[in-house]
Amino acid sequence: MKQPKDEINESNSTSLVAPSPVVNDQGSYRALQFSDFRLLVVGVFLSMFGRQMLTVAIGWELYERTSSALVLGGVGLAQVIPLIALFLPAGYIADRYNRKQVVIVSQVVLVLASLVLTILSYVHGSLFLIYACLAVMGGAQSFSNPASSALVAQAVPEYAYENATTWRSSVAQLSSVIGPASGGFLIGLLHGATFVYALSGLTSVIFILLLIQMRATHQPQKRAKNQKTLGSLVEGISFLGKTQVMLAAITLDLFAVLLGGATALLPIFARDILHVGPIGLGWLQAADSLGAVCMALLLAHRPPFQHAGRALLLAVAGFGLATIIFGLSRWFWLSLPMLFLLGACDNISVVVRSTLLLVRTPDEMRGRVGAVSSLFIGTSNQLGGFESGLVAQFFGPVVSVVVGGIGTILVVALIAWRWPEMRHLGRLRETPQDV
């Protein structure tokens, strides 16, 4: 049942939001009417924009210095190992302590690491120190991601969760479009990556200043006297195991990303199959993010999902189908819209999954559940690229992509059969019968 618009802050026990004017529950911009959320979403955009620029800069500089693909592979490895190692304590801290402060401290660490990278770039420092900085950044992100995701619930009331998730996804995808392009432009203009590292640190500084202005407060989780710390750490995993709809959504997203790794092989398709060169590769790399941005804007201007489970299953099936067509295509103007469709379908999955995590998780557990989700999705991106490359090495890129798309569709069918709750999932805000 919907809450009265003038009693949102008093009746919503799972979201601590500063008093705000009465807003239109059905408005496409309802989440943006809350000042805390505006500050958060602008900060998230700037932070992700800086990270995207830094990713391009570090890849360009390391390959320029070493001409080694193995060195480039180490970049992702250096950042994913801390994510795996720290996801349990990161989620616990996001629930036990003030989430805004957790994000601020994480951003401070990112600023310091960016500053060190700037110095290392200027003096041509050792690869070991560069990898160490990347590992520190990965560790900071492992704490920042779950705390930042859970912070959305403190910035808006519950009725705006889905809209807030859509806008947050929009800015993330927008940063994926313009961040790499801006980083590449600055590297070419300034003949080096040093300034890009410094600019990335500056975006985190601005995010910190925006966070300081947020009025949202957080009541830290009060651990019971007889509750062991280890049990509290793994409680997020236990909660997901008992919440069938959320487990199904995360599993579906996990395997879709793991199997549908077409984007990892785009350089091969651009050069050897579609014959479009580096310019065509740039368009191919941007197409899925553009599709995601357009879909996010569309979702922000439509009513909340009435049949969210069906929408999620169809979206992931569409993701698999677009992947298959892309793999079989020999025509650039067919491959491009397939990647656009792939990104659009993926964004539907992101919005449904992220909204479920907000709505169906008690506030005192959002950090730990968010950390588990970040681990699954973050590592699946890295492993998905590795899986696609491994299959392509032995059977060719076309087989790798097409088989991955077929596998994605089979996973959709398996999830729909194994978890009928997902097929019957209606509005995201309704309390499921299976939890």
Image (spheres, rainbow, N blue to C red):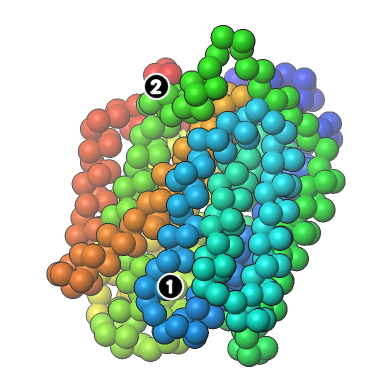
Residue 295 drawn above or below residue 192: above
Whole-percent x and y of residue 165? 59, 44
* Mark 1 burial class by Cα count in 10 Å: few <14, some 14-19, many 20+: some
Q: Which residue is mark 2?
A: 242
Which residue is drawn at the image coordinates 50% and 24% (left, top)? 230
> Which secondary structure lies at badge 2?
helix
Residue type at mark 1? Leu
Look at the image and tell me in which quarter the N terminus lies.
top right
| Horizontal relation, residue 94 to residue 417: left or right | right
Q: Nearer the viewer, mark 2 or mark 1?
A: 1
- Decide which of 119, 202 is in the foreground and name it: 119
- Decide which of 16, 196 is in the foreground and name it: 196
Which residue is drawn at the image coordinates 63% and 17% (left, top)? 223
Work out whether mark 2 precedes mark 1 in sequence or the reverse, and give the earlier one.
Answer: 1
Q: CA distance from mark 2 to mark 1?
A: 39 Å
Q: Which mark is residue 72?
A: 1
Look at the image and tell me in which quarter the C terminus lies.
top left
Which quadrant of the figure has residue 170? bottom right
Residue type at mark 2? Lys
